Amino acid sequence: MKKFLAIVLACAMMLSLALTASAEEVVTLTYAEVNPLDSLMGQTATAFKDKVEELTGGSVVIEIQASGVLGAEGDVLDTMIGGADTVDIARVATFSLTNYGVQRTMLLSIPYTFTGREHFWAFASSDLGTALLNEPADLQLGVRGLFYVEEGFRHFFFKDEVAGIEDLAGKKLRVSTDPIMTGMVGGLQANATVVSFGELYQSLSTGVVDGAEQPIVNYQSNAFHEVAPYMLLDGHTLGCAEVIMTDTAWAKLSEEQQAAVIEAGKFASEFNANLSAEIEGNCKDELIAAGVTFVDVNDNQPWKDACAELINSYTAGLEADYQAIAELAK
């Protein structure tokens, strides 16, 4: 009976939002996504768009500009924080916000913070998750977080066979210019080697690097398994991101429309979580069939211990938040 009443109340709220919004002036918002519409993040954007338009009775329209037509992620973020009104909504990696003074959100990029997807989504739905989502607005950056999304855990992959953490010593592992990733690779006794993403396939095939790291889906879609068919499932970081909106766009919405956007964000987060796990599972099966060897990491404590100096450095002053995130795994 309680479950039935909850469903009735939820339906009533959705109907109320739609009826109220239907009489309001139409607001059109531009949503930037660097990936194609048929990708995980593209489909997540579409789910959000459809739900917003449903809940508002079409008084808020989301126009998705996918495949990076509005620029790379960093350029889009610069545009939004710079005050331009060409982009209203965008999905950005959480670590990208650290370039603008965001501190607490940086904890989501610390290696071995999350023990699994369930841990991350427990965080995302917690009060602390909401607090970190609100951090850009609290810092008056001109943008606000709407909801979290993820694209799976990132793992190391290699040209040659590997069995565990001890095999990383001395290996040349590709990194970007991200200092956290560089520090993690160093902590694991490997040699961090900066290579652009566009040159990674060639660098692996010619031996410029011995390995790299990516989520399983990206590993497959970029055909890295063709030249590096061994993957250690260490899950060092989760590819988490958040969908943000400019304060200018937010101010265009009525309270009812704002409530609909938040509700649609919750729906899109759940959609993303389910689809991400499904796509990753399918990719893994296909990769095994293609000859990829996956090596499970049953205990990542030695990996975390190896990165202790890095972890302590980046969590300094944020120990309470870091501990609170850890406790959400229990």
Image (tube, rainbow, N blue to C red):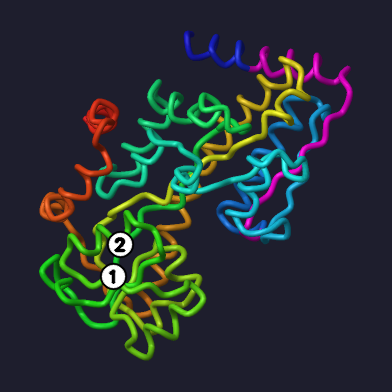
Is 48 on the left or on the right of 233, as rendered? right
Q: Which residues are magenta?
A: 11-36
Kindly indicate whether the residue at mark 2 contacts the one at mark 1 (C-beta within 8 angstroms). Answer: yes
Say if residue 137 shows up in the picture.
Answer: yes
Identify the element where label 2 is drawn.
Answer: helix
Q: How many circles with numbers are drawn on the protein?
A: 2
| Camera-side residue of 200 and 195 | 195
* Residue ID for mark 1: 192
Is 261 on the left or on the right of 186, as rendered? right
Q: Name above or below for residue 85 compared with residue 210.
A: above
Q: Residues within 10 Å of mark 2 (few under 14, many from 20)?
A: many
Give the Cα separation between the discs numbered 1 and 2. 6 Å
Q: Tell me if residue 288 is in the magenta stretch.
A: no
Say if residue 329 shows up in the picture.
Answer: no
Tell me which residue sits at (13%, 52%) in the image: 299
Q: Residues within 10 Å of mark 1 (few under 14, many from 20)?
A: many
| Camera-side residue of 173 and 50 | 173
Q: Name above or below for residue 293 compared with residue 100.
A: below
Q: Amino acid at mark 2?
A: Thr
Q: Tell me if residue 25 is in the magenta stretch.
A: yes
Nearer the N terminus, badge 1 or badge 2? Answer: 2
Is 258 on the left or on the right of 189, as rendered? right
x and y percent of residue 13 in the render?
A: 66, 14
Tell me which residue sits at (21%, 30%) in the image: 330
| Camera-side residue of 119 and 288 | 119
Q: Amino acid at mark 1?
A: Ala
Q: Name above or below for residue 218 compared with residue 235.
A: below
x and y percent of residue 7 in the render?
A: 57, 16
x and y percent of residue 72 in the render?
A: 62, 59
Q: Name above or below for residue 321 compared with residue 241.
A: above
* Residue ID for mark 2: 182
Identify the element where label 1 is drawn.
Answer: strand
